[in-house]
Image (spheres, rainbow, N blue to C red):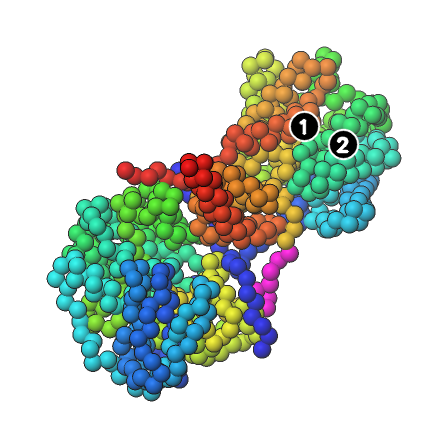
Amino acid sequence: MEKLILSVSPHISGKRTTQSIMLDVIIALIPAAIASVVFFGIRSLLVICVCIATCMLSEFLFEKLCKRENTVLDLSSAVTGMILAFNLPVTIPLWQAIFGSVVAIIVVKQLFGGIGQNFANPAIAARIVMMTAFSGTMTAWVAPNAINKAVDALSTATPLVAESKGETPPSYLTLLLGTHAGCIGETCAAALILGGLYLILRGVISWHTPAAFIAVVAIMSFICGKDALYQVLSGGLLLGAFFMATDYSTTPSTKWGKIIFGIGCGLITILIRFWGNLPEGVSFSILLMNILTPYISKLTQNKPLVGEAKV
Amino acid sequence: MKLHGVHVPHMKNTAECKGVRMPVPAAVTIPMAMHIGKPAKLIVKKGDTVKLGQLIGEADGFVSSNIHSSVSGTVQKVDEMVSSMGAKVPCAVIASDGKQELYEGIKPPEPTDFDSFISAVKLSGVVGLGGAGFPSFVKLSVKELSKIEHVVINAAECEPYITSDTRTMMDKGEYVFKGIEAIKKYLGAKHFVIGIENNKKEAISRMKELSAKTEGVEVHVLPSMYPQGGEKVLVFNTVNRVIPKGGLPLDVGVIVINVTTLAFIAEYLETGIPLVEKCVTVDGSAVKEPKNIIVPIGTPIKDLIEAAGGLKADPAKVLYGGPMMGLTVPSMDEPVLKNTNAIVVMDKNEAKQHKTTPCIRCGACLNHCPFRLNPRDIAHAYKMGDGEALKKLCVDLCMECGCCSYICPANRPLVQTNKLAKIKLREYLAEQKAQQEKEGK
């Protein structure tokens, strides 16, 4: 008879693994990816694939180089690649997309210790680096070609830019469907909401952050005399609220921590959108809140159930 | 406020199986420590003839327990063995003559008051049968009886596989209520709550049926959420009180007693037969015919497995108790103990340990801890050797239920780290105390 295994309890474990969580996130992102291919053409699929491949490859090579345990199969780098691609315009030169992916994985994630150790969301930090480095190509948004072939590849204002310039804004339906100019994965509000709900129902993310984030944007827009629904459906808000402000390692873990994080993101977004020089502030708001995460976590620690000694 | 926990698979495959008595084993090995506290003093020697129910180990000190022979036969040898808790203890190996002759001295105790009730419970050798193994008479020796406001009867049975408490309620329901009457009579307790998880429909209806005839008994149906049967969790969920850190249920006016322990006490008051056998759930992926078996204490696990039809796969891991908090057994020759409520035999597939991957800071551990601890930060503080941080994180509150390890998607050994961190904290506190004393001088 073989030797019996001796180990410390528990002897069973739940089914969820890091890999299955990341797979769920990828599944949740797929509707928006499909929408982007439908609206922006096959090139958006190319950009998504290039980003995913570069992210996974950078992670693989870096960990090989540093003789770290290889984590490429946990799919977290694929998620980063997908989200980064969602934040790029479809016309982005591929070498710039590759550059961004390398920055995301190596500079923002691996140099800080790899999965779970980075303080900033890799996709967001990389996007901001790209915004600064390639401000021209990063804002070369085009109108969806499937809808209007004539203006294909012509730079068009996104809804938020259009609004700030006083042009006629698109209708709610356009915003919901995503048939307007914008980054690859941020335009189709319906697909993003679908993906977000999937993650919430699967228990991968909790509803607290997205709810607080979106609610604050809506309420503040209303108070500032803007169209609340328009503000919620346009820009990168839904993508940010459901997929980037819910990243595990860069956001607080407790219920109240998540709510505070969401409120903070909402307020900064509104500040940038209404009073800043940039048309959109979701990325910056999440990055700034990432920096505050350790403090929020400290403030919102769960209180152990110590009880009081009865006299 | 709600306490967190995890949803574990129930796997109560044996809930319908009434306990069957197994053939008398050829020999039993009875260790002198099957309880929390000091091991009992062995009072038989090699060659002695013993009968069923005869005292072979005498309680030594206050927190200790009597131990009786579970077979009639001859003491083959007096030996030393490593107990389930890891310490070396004396044990008696008794060869059975197969007759199971009852010891002549056995007669029902006739308690008349609190003191005689407690000494009867002490003589019976009963310990917490839910798994803890704390001598029951110590728990019931309440100094100020007026402090008892509630008696919580633990029938949650939240561990996967185990159904022995379910069978107690189904098959010995009347004894549960006789036990309640005894506690009422001798301890003066008035309010009883039976806490049962909602996955035991039949046991719940049986208890409800009986409680309708008894005053002051409430059947509290609880959600099936592990660790519902943890003492502090159960007290919180039934009578909404928080047992303080390092305290006892009595500190908040509660006594918690396992349902099988209670039924046994009632049965003992009637028959006078001490704790010599247990109803044990035998289950797991490697067991051919999972069932509940009534087994003499000290029976080797392999004999018990034989009584459950043997194995259908090579055993990879054998557990005393359920898969969430059970202890692994080094060999199939180990005996069934007083506090054994299940033997789970896992095959290779079920016992497979998943690979540990880096923490992704998902927060599942801290959002599922019943006591709201933060296993993630505890692991970090332990790694850093930071005793002060461990003190602030209250790691000594951890009951080692295993929710954190179970839920962790990275399969990190969190509860294991908690155990190590507790030791670290104890060392740190001792150091701190020594330091203070030195400064005081």
The crowding category of the residue bearing disc 2, from other C-alpha atoms within 10 Å (few below 14, some 14 to 19, many at least 20), is many
Question: Where in the figure is residue B389, as x and y percent of width and height?
Answer: 52, 38
Seen at 59% across and 68% down, the residue is B348
- The residue labelled by disc 1 is A287
Seen at 34% across and 86% down, the residue is B47
Seen at 17% across and 52% down, the residue is B188
The chain under label 1 reads A
Question: Which stretch appears magenta?
Answer: B348-355
Question: Where in the figure is residue B347, as x and y percent of width and height?
Answer: 56, 69
- The residue labelled by disc 2 is A126
Question: Where in the figure is residue B99, as x and y percent of width and height?
Answer: 30, 86
Say which element carries label 2: helix
Amino acid at circle 2: Ala
- Give the quarter of the image for residue A97: top right
Q: Quadrant of the C terminus of chain B?
A: top left
Say which element carries label 1: helix
The chain under label 2 reads A
- Give the quarter of the image for residue A293: top right
Q: Is residue B215 left or right of residue B351?
A: left
Question: Where in the figure is residue B346, as x and y percent of width and height?
Answer: 53, 68
The crowding category of the residue bearing disc 1, from other C-alpha atoms within 10 Å (few below 14, some 14 to 19, many at least 20), is many
Q: Is residue A44 magenta?
A: no
Residue B337 in view: yes
Amino acid at circle 1: Leu
Q: Residue furthest left?
A: B112
Q: Is residue B292 above or below residue A114?
A: below
Q: Is residue A87 left or right of residue A254?
A: right
Real-space CA distance between mark 2 and mark 1, rounded to the nearest whole angstrom: 11 Å
Q: Is residue A171 above or below residue B78?
A: above
